[in-house]
Image: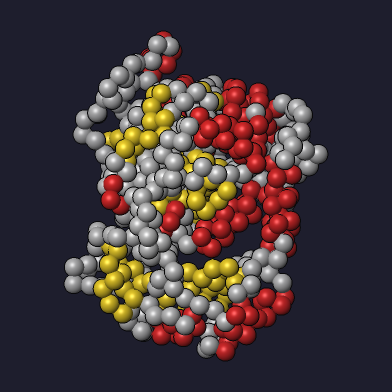
């Protein structure tokens, strides 16, 4: 059973006629083999490094067995669910049923839960399957996932005037100081600071960069044009020509990426996601259903079975040669309220709250000012490529905060990028925006330019970054050496020399990353 967090209240049974979109994750047949391929093609100097798999090869590896598909289909037909569709690999089944049918299918009762901010969800704290399907189905949602992201992501913060952190020192480098003011921070500053200012993308038809939009968001092209006219005039035409496949955060991604990688092609992928809305007296308009990516939540609000399947989906992308970057969130250790930093297993034990997904932190210069999400996963063990640096960091804590985090868990963040006071156009006006959702498109743009340079000299793109990053890629980042993360009533994990969970390995330096990406050294063993 997954207990909802304290900020969720059960307010009554769900309307039995309300329609649900159930997503059923059938057991993948050869994920272990896919994972083996993933690490071979992403580990430097492996004989297969860079030999990424095709879409068809990946689908063949994760396709469920015929027996699994037959058993799942028989179960659905027997319970009246005769209309459904599959993902390309047939590892996900999508069905549309009313609550009454879903309750019969899963031997459960759905209720309406209300969040303290007024959002409502139809969920159940537990569900069950026939015994013969326990090894055939990994997850079914929506059931026990009590994720909730506000309509405007918590990463969005608009400022009428800047807050200058105590101890801030302006850049001493004359070239940088000429283009980098504290507020707002412009694209020209990022391009100068991270070393891409003189780089012109070469392979425009091959190397691509894309960003995802959730909650029905789409980039607003007039705002993007307004931004580019002011901060990257030569790219202004791209506001109406970049590819949109299929309000606010979508704008941020588009403005940052177009400003950084022009004239490279940019793709916007928009995924619908309206909440299965239940009207209540206090809530008269539809709210939003969160999805994993730049929209994250406390790890414990995501059922582990679902988290594992999302991770496997990321692995499928990685095996095909895609680098996937996600934000680490802006919540520091968790909730600002100490009383909310507890487990949701019914025991209410005190704990730090890792977020999911995780990856890129936020910083200001070489000092960590922003409360970047950071920590150690309870769901995922520390991977082999993190053993050295993350293990050392935990050891150096000397038992500090023992019991409040998983010392053997996957540590995050991996890297950082500027995340404070981005120049930003929204609703036909200029303002600023801060957070790791600003850092992430910035870092992704720099990695995309590294890939462009690799492709231009006949090499494959970096693909999945982690083995390369933890082996030698970290040398291409500027270490952030001071700061700490906070929330849960304390200032906890310190920023240190080398890797730390607040800033990872630090901020990217494009010329160094290119040089490191072109090196071929001794194979990293695992």
Tell whether 476 sits left or right of 141. Answer: right
* Colour setup of the view: secondary structure
Tell whether 227 sits left or right of 139. Answer: left
Image x and y of residue 285, in percent = 25, 66
Q: Is residue 302 above or below residue 385?
A: below
Tell whether 265 sits left or right of 283. Answer: right
Could you say which is closer to the camera, residue 294 or residue 146? 146
Q: Is residue 89 above or below residue 455?
A: below
Q: Quadrant of residue 312?
A: bottom right
Locate the C terminus by quadrant: top right
Q: Is residue 261 visible?
A: no
- All told, the count of numbered labels is 0
Residue displayed at 39% across by 80% down: 109
Residue displayed at 27% across by 22% down: 166
Q: Is residue 490 visible?
A: yes
Q: Quadrant of residue 367?
A: top left
Residue displayed at 61% across by 77% down: 133
Image x and y of residue 400, in percent = 43, 35
Could you say which is closer to the camera, residue 336 or residue 278? 336
Could you say which is closer to the camera, residue 437 or residue 207? 437
Residue displayed at 66% across by 45% down: 321
Task: Report the residue that reaches farthest toward the right.
Answer: 47
Image x and y of residue 273, in percent = 41, 62
Locate the N terminus by quadrant: bottom left
Could you say which is closer to the camera, residue 366 or residue 316? 366
């Amino acid at each position: 059973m997954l207990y909802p967090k304290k900020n969720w209240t059960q307010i009554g049974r769900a309307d039995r006629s309300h329609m649900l979109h159930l997503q059923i994750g059938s057991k993948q047949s050869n994920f272990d083999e896919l994972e083996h391929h993933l690490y071979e093609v992403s580990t430097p100097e492996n004989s297969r490094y860079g030999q990424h798999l095709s879409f068809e090869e990946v689908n063949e590896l994760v396709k469920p067995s015929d027996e699994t598909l037959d058993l799942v289909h028989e179960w659905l037909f027997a319970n009246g669910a005769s209309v459904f569709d599959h993902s390309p690999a047939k590892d996900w089944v999508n069905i549309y049923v009313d609550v009454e049918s879903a309750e019969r299918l899963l031997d459960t009762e759905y209720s309406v839960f209300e969040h303290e901010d007024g959002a409502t969800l139809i969920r159940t704290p537990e569900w069950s399957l026939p015994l013969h399907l326990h090894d055939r189905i990994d997850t079914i949602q929506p059931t026990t996932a009590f994720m909730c992201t506000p309509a405007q992501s918590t990463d969005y913060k608009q400022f009428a005037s800047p807050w200058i952190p105590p101890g801030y020192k302006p850049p001493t480098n004359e070239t940088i100081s000429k283009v980098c003011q504290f507020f707002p921070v412009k694209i020209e500053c990022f391009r100068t600071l991270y070393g891409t200012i003189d780089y012109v993308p070469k392979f425009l038809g091959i190397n691509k960069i894309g960003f995802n939009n959730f909650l029905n968001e789409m980039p607003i092209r007039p705002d993007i044009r307004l931004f580019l006219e002011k901060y990257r005039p030569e790219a202004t035409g791209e506001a109406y020509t970049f590819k949109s496949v299929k309000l606010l955060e979508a704008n941020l991604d588009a403005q940052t990426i177009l400003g950084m990688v022009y004239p490279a092609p940019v793709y916007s992928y928009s995924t619908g996601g309206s909440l299965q809305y239940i009207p209540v007296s206090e809530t008269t308009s539809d709210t939003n259903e969160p999805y994993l990516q730049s929209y994250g939540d406390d790890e414990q609000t995501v059922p582990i079975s679902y988290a594992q399947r999302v991770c496997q989906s990321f692995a499928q992308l990685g095996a095909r040669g895609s680098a996937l970057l996600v934000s680490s969130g802006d919540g520091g250790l968790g909730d600002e309220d100490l009383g909310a930093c507890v487990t949701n297993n019914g025991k209410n034990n005190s704990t730090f709250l890792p977020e999911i997904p995780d990856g890129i932190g936020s910083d200001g210069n070489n000092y960590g000012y922003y409360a970047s999400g950071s920590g150690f996963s309870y769901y995922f063990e520390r991977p082999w490529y993190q053993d050295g640096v993350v293990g050392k960091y935990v050891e150096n804590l000397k038992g500090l905060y023992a019991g409040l985090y998983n010392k053997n868990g996957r540590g995050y963040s991996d890297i950082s990028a500027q995340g404070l006071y981005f120049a930003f156009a929204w609703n036909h006006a200029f303002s600023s925006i801060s957070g790791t959702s600003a850092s992430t498109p910035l870092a992704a743009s720099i990695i995309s330019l590294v890939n462009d340079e690799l492709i231009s000299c006949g090499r494959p793109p970096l693909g999945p970054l982690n083995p390369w990053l933890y082996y030698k890629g970290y040398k291409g980042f500027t270490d952030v050496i001071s700061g700490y993360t906070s929330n849960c009533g304390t200032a906890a994990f310190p920023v240190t020399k080398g890797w730390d969970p607040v800033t990872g390995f630090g901020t990217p330096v494009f010329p160094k990353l290119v040089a490191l990406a072109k090196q071929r050294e001794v194979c990293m063993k695992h």
